[in-house]
Amino acid sequence: MPQTAAGQASRLNAILESAVDAIITIDDAGKIETVNPAAKRLFGYDRAGFIGRNVHFLMPEPYHSEYDSYLQNYRAKRRRKVIGIGCKVIGLRGDGTTFPMHLSVSEFHVGGDVHFAGIIRDLTDQANTEQALLQAQKMEALGQLTGGIAHDFNNLLTVIVGNLEMLDGRLDNPSHHALLAEALEAAEVGSRLTGRLLAFARRDVLEPKLVNLNELVVALSDMLRRTLGETISLSTALGEEIWTTRVDPSQAESAIVNLAVNARDAMPAGGRLLVETANVVIEPDEAIVRAGFVAGEYVQVAVSDTGTGMPQAIADRAFEPFFTTKDRGRGTGLGLSMVYGFAKQSGGHAAIYSEVGVGTTVKLYLPRHDVDAAAEGAPATDVGVAHADGEWVMVVEDDVRIRRLTVARLTELGYRITEAASGDEALQLLAGLADVALVFTDLVMPDMSGQELAATVRARYPSVKVLLTSGYSEEFANSEDLSGQRLRLLRKPYRMAELADAVRAALTETSF
């Protein structure tokens, strides 16, 4: 049965009313004839604000001036620029703000007159997601670059520190000792800088424990007040029944202190600093929009200041390593990057919100972790510095300079040494040696990783202990696999005393 004109109009009106996208119809001259509710919501006008006006008032320049020419060219030459093709343009809301949109225009006829219908889709969420994805990809690329650089520098620093220490015992002139001590101090500064790079790159070796962030913030309060000075007031707002998270407590403390120091520098004339904690649930649809987030339950710690704030262009780069707005010599640009890396490596996220002249808030989202604290391993027993007792140690290291240095250091400590340049060579040597007590191996090697070598050694020679070392551990950055297999890791660069302690601890621990 044919549908009446009234029925057709009713059906069309229902479609317009329920459409998610904005729909606007215009006459041959570009004047608006009808709008649907979605258009009113999108642009921020009531119906009277649309009807009879040229549609170009909904577009900023240069689209505003160009739109009439599109219609003229189409009428005169049937040249399509927007009509029947669709394109991405910029929309102008009633409040003066702009947004990206997709505009698709089609032609229709009523009583011989030409009219046009435009369907407008708001692309704001899509644009935000794409931008966040690009930012995440850039940060990941920077992480890979800085992690590799830090690893190489740690190897160099290991050689520098080790040889300086070896030289120290051979000098007689007191002035020479002073020069050497200064060089060692500079190397230590270099080690701390590479540590921050590794934290950003998520290549640092963490020691996660169950942490109550409320207790951690309370414990830090006195130190934060001393750090901030008398012109800045500190207050806290701690969430009730805060969830437990599993993170490295020293890294969490460093992150909060770094944020407080940045906030202090943004308030040269004084101000207020607020540290808040809260339980937060990120829903799946929210995680999609906020690229970089994974849906789930988090413990949030937020540090807010009333400082100078920063424009969005600077806030977008604030977590990048070496990016700083401070004067030369006043900062390394690694503080916020370390905070970002700690959050990501802990399975969480970091976000920054800032407004010029109002202040800045940095939020850390750390995953909720429901595990009985009693299940956490007991703390390791402190082991003092000790020399050798005649044990035989196999040094496995592919870097010839580090291998040569390590052999010299362990020899000086009194150990008998066998050296290998790879995991395969180490296994071949072990097959013919009965007295090796410890395999001291680099973690990252080209042919066989230190963990793979450790697993093979333990399977074939249960009485042989294993100690790993690395400038970073990309494969086991959160140390979960290492601690699960009860493997010790000595972080490069290390001092002679640290080497002596680690080797003695590995040799004297109970077999597994």
Image (tube, rainbow, N blue to C red):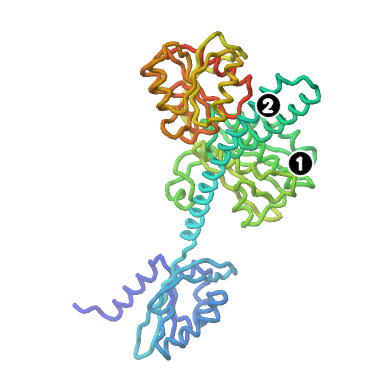
User: Identity of the amino acid at label 1?
Assistant: Ile
Seen as rendered, the residue at the extreme left is: 1
Of residue 377 and residue 9, the one placed in the foreground of this image is 377
Using the image as rendered, state which of residue 290 and residue 203 is in the foreground: 203
The amino acid sitting under disc 2 is Leu
Q: Residues within 10 Å of mark 2 (few under 14, many from 20)?
A: some
Mark 2 sits on what residue? 164
Give the spatial CA distance, label 1 vs label 2: 43 Å
Residue 220, relative to residue 123: is it above or below? above
Residue at left 61%, top 30%? 159
- Across and down, in percent, residue 221 comes to 69, 32
In the rendered image, the vertical position of residue 119 relative to residue 311, given as above or below: below
Which callout, 1 or 2, points at the residue further toward the start of the chain? Answer: 2
Residue at 77 percent of width and 29 percent of height: 179
Q: Nearer the viewer, residue 2 or 329?
A: 329
Q: Which residue is the site of mark 1?
A: 232
Q: How far across and down, in percent of the image, does residue 416 sit?
A: 53, 14
